[in-house]
Image (cartoon, coloured by chain):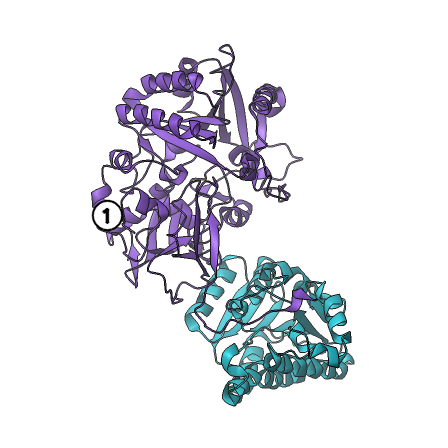
């Protein structure tokens, strides 16, 4: 159902949550160069303005911004309505918000654990449900979400974050199943170790890459190919191997 | 087993790992904390007493190295372009934007940075902090001459500076080697280009005299000039010959060429750190003869893309590794107009008698445009840049002898290239150093500023 009363803008129309995230930026920049239009959502107004300015100067046809803490799920309905009222429909909804949580507290403090689940899982589920209803109606487009390889197997170093991302990945599987008949792609992007503020304070950064190195994989996943994407690619065999380690052995490993 | 996945978390949020940083010449290293800034409004917590904003660290010596145990604020993620006004020909960006990315943005739109150095691997912040110059200095001055305003984090506050607002701080920050604070945003004027192509001419010369004549006759009509001189040969016949290179922008391009062609992205890298110096004197003289030969062949004259014209060394990303683990020194001086030819003659003699050779020597005339910064290096005269492999003790001895020529002529050394100038030579080179000193943000210091006495460790 394409509503022709809305002006057809040149380039793709994107709804981006976590627009100030390091992973979202190179992806958005690439699309901005192709005259995409953006509805950007992030928490920090000043930073959001800088990203919006950057995308505009780099060629974005239109950039709208909304400053919102996405853990406030009660505001999601208004947010999505407003976004669709502004742009008519979206080609891509890209969810890139997330937190790792304070690693020293998250394993002992249930409040901190809850915060991690809220940001990474609950808020995403709420948004995705609202977005799914819209995309199901427009019968086209891509919903792409950043999850993580950490969701493939629980490890002592980040299992709270990992469980939120695992839940999100399963949620996306179901959503993909639901929206398949509507012709909507539902993509779960599983980055490995990326050099972002989230990983800044980790002592070891194995096989780490810059966000812009995974941007091509993400951009490709918007269009075609598998709807569960490991990036960089080598995380797929690594995580397959890790999932195959028998639990009695795994729990003795220092991972 | 599976080391790839072991990612232990550090407990303290502000715990930074000590990293050994080296600059382009690889003669100085600093063990320091590395903190990557992603937003200009970010608060950085540092347990160390001093910090320094750094970008690509392409300065040869120690202006880009923080104090031992200090903090390097890596600004390369501050790369957002905030405003572009094609009518007014003005651009505002964050200071960590790399020139290569700036060119990717500007060239397809028909614009160019006002001044570019010999590499596109530097950041805009670095261009400001070193008040860089390029092949067009004789016409357009240095980068600082085109900066309209700067946003600076100075004494913990965000301050706007321009020739009108906080003009002294503005003048201190341009060429200020990052010591006045963190440069956040830079607004500067652009130049319009008719295409991404230039018309280039190579003219051989056999002596300094002919170089100076060529230079005088070219500077009006050719906005870009530079010379390469062979001060490496041991044969008196070959020593001192060179090539004068001049270029100008052109719209007259064959229809087979795209008007705004982007720079080639495929660059070579040296995949490991050679344990030995790969550049020998024999190899060098071969290279110089070859260069001279190819440069003078007709193929090199005529239409050329801006990339090989402005950035000939960028084709190998990390060519600095070729000088081996001991690294190399670059020595760039400027001799004031009146004393230039006599100083160059003295220099030529010293270099001919020297036990070591400069592998790459570049001559260029600076124009008379007054620089903006208190510590700006460019000034009317002739500048010479020399590359010396680090061969103790000869290299340092030789450079000390050249210092004398610089001092006698009333010239100056370029901090961005320096790893060893003395405090007194610095003061002679930059008579405005005491004006500058008042604007130093005490949180900021570099190995250079400690060494030449602008700050005390």
Identify the residue shown where x is 59% and y is 79%.
Answer: A161
Whether residue B190 sits left or right of residue B148 in the image: it is right
In percent of width and height, residue B389 lies at 49, 31
Residue B37: give x, y in percent of width and height: 44, 61
Picture coordinates of residue A73 (x, y %)? Answer: 54, 87
**Residue B28 sits in quarter:** top left
Looking at the image, residue A242 lies above or below residue B39: below
Identify the residue at image location x=56%, y=39%. B321
Residue B132: x and y, percent? 39, 40
Image quarter (top left, top right, bottom left or bottom right) of the N terminus of chain B: bottom right
- Within 10 Å of disc 1 (Cα), the crowding (few <14, some 14-19, many 20+) is some
Judge by depth and name the residue closer to the eye, B356 or A208: B356
Quadrant in the rendering for residue A213: bottom right
Q: Nearer the viewer, residue A4 or B254?
A: B254
Q: Name chain B's colour.
A: purple
Mark 1: secondary structure: helix
Q: Which residue is mark 1?
A: B437
Residue occupying image coordinates x 39% and y 18%: B350
Question: According to the rendering, which colour does chain A have?
Answer: cyan
* Along the viewing direction, whichever of B365 and B237 lies nearer the viewer: B237
The chain identifier of the residue carrying mark 1 reads B
The answer to whether any part of residue A130 appears in the image is yes
Judging depth in this view, the residue of B425 and B94 nearest the camera is: B425
Residue B348 vertical placement versus B314 (above, below): above
């Amino acid at each position: 159902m394409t509503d022709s009363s809305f002006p057809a803008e040149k380039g793709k129309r994107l709804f981006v949550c976590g627009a100030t995230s390091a992973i979202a930026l190179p992806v958005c920049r690439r699309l901005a160069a192709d005259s995409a239009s953006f509805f950007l959502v992030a928490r920090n107004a000043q930073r959001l303005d800088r990203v919006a300015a950057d995308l505009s100067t780099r060629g974005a046809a239109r950039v709208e911004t909304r400053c919102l803490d996405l853990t406030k799920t009660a505001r999601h309905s208004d947010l999505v309505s407003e976004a669709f009222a502004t742009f008519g429909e979206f080609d891509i909804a890209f969810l890139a918000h997330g937190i790792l949580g304070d690693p020293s507290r998250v394993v002992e403090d249930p409040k901190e654990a809850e915060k991690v689940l809220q940001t990474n899982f609950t808020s995403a589920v709420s948004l995705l449900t609202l977005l799914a209803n819209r995309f199901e109606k427009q019968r086209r487009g891509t919903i792409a979400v950043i999850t993580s390889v950490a969701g493939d197997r629980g490890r002592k170093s980040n299992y709270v974050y990992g469980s939120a991302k695992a839940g999100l990945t399963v949620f996306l599987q179901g959503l993909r199943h639901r929206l398949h008949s509507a012709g909507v792609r539902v993509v779960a992007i599983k980055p490995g170790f990326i050099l972002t503020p989230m990983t800044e304070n980790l002592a070891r950064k194995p096989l780490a890459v810059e966000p812009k190195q995974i941007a091509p994989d993400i951009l490709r996943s918007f269009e075609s190919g598998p709807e569960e994407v490991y990036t960089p690619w080598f995380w797929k065999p690594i995580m397959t191997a890790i999932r195959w380690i028998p639990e009695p052995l795994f729990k003795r490993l220092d991972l | 087993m599976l080391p790839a996945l072991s990612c232990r978390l550090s407990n303290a949020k502000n715990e930074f790992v000590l990293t050994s940083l080296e600059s382009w010449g690889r003669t100085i290293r600093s063990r320091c904390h590395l903190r990557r800034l992603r937003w200009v409004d970010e608060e950085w917590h540092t347990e160390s007493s001093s910090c320094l904003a750094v970008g690509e660290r392409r300065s040869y010596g120690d202006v880009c190295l923080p104090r031992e145990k200090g903090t390097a604020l890596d600004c390369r993620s501050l790369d957002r372009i905030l405003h572009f006004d094609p009518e007014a020909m003005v651009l505002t960006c964050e200071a960590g934007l790399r020139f290569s990315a700036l060119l990717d943005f500007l060239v397809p739109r028909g614009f160019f940075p006002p001044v570019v150095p010999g590499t596109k691997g530097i950041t805009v912040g670095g261009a400001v902090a070193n008040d860089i110059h390029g092949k067009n200095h004789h016409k357009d001055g240095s980068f600082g001459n085109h900066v309209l305003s700067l946003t600076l984090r100075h004494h913990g506050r965000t301050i706007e500076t321009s020739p009108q607002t906080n003009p002294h701080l503005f003048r201190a920050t341009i060429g200020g080697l990052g010591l006045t604070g963190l440069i956040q945003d830079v607004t500067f004027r652009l130049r319009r280009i008719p295409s991404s192509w230039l018309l280039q001419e190579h003219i051989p010369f056999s002596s300094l005299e002919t170089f100076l004549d060529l230079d005088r006759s070219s500077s009006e009509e050719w906005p870009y000039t530079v010379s390469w001189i062979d001060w490496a040969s041991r044969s008196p016949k070959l020593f001192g010959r060179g090539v004068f290179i001049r270029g100008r922008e052109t719209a007259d391009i064959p229809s087979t060429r795209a008007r705004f062609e982007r720079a080639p992205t495929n660059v070579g890298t040296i995949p490991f750190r050679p344990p030995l110096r790969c550049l020998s004197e024999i190899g060098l003289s071969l290279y110089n003869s070859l260069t001279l030969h190819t440069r003078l062949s007709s193929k090199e004259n005529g239409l050329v893309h801006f990339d090989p014209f402005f950035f000939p060394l960028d084709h190998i990303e990390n060519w600095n590794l070729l000088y081996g683990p001991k690294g190399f020194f670059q020595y760039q001086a400027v001799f004031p107009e009146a004393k230039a030819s006599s100083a160059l003659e003295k220099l030529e003699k010293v270099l001919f008698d020297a036990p070591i050779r400069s592998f790459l020597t570049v001559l260029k005339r600076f124009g008379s445009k007054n620089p903006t910064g208190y510590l700006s290096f460019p000034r009317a005269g002739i500048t010479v840049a020399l590359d010396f492999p680090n061969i103790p003790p000869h290299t340092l001895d030789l450079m000390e002898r050249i210092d004398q020529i610089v001092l006698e002529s009333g010239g100056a050394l370029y901090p961005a290239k320096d790893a060893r100038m003395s405090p007194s030579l610095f003061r002679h080179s930059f008579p405005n150093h005491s004006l500058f000193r008042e604007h130093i943000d005490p949180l900021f210091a570099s190995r250079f500023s400690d060494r030449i006495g602008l700050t005390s460790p």
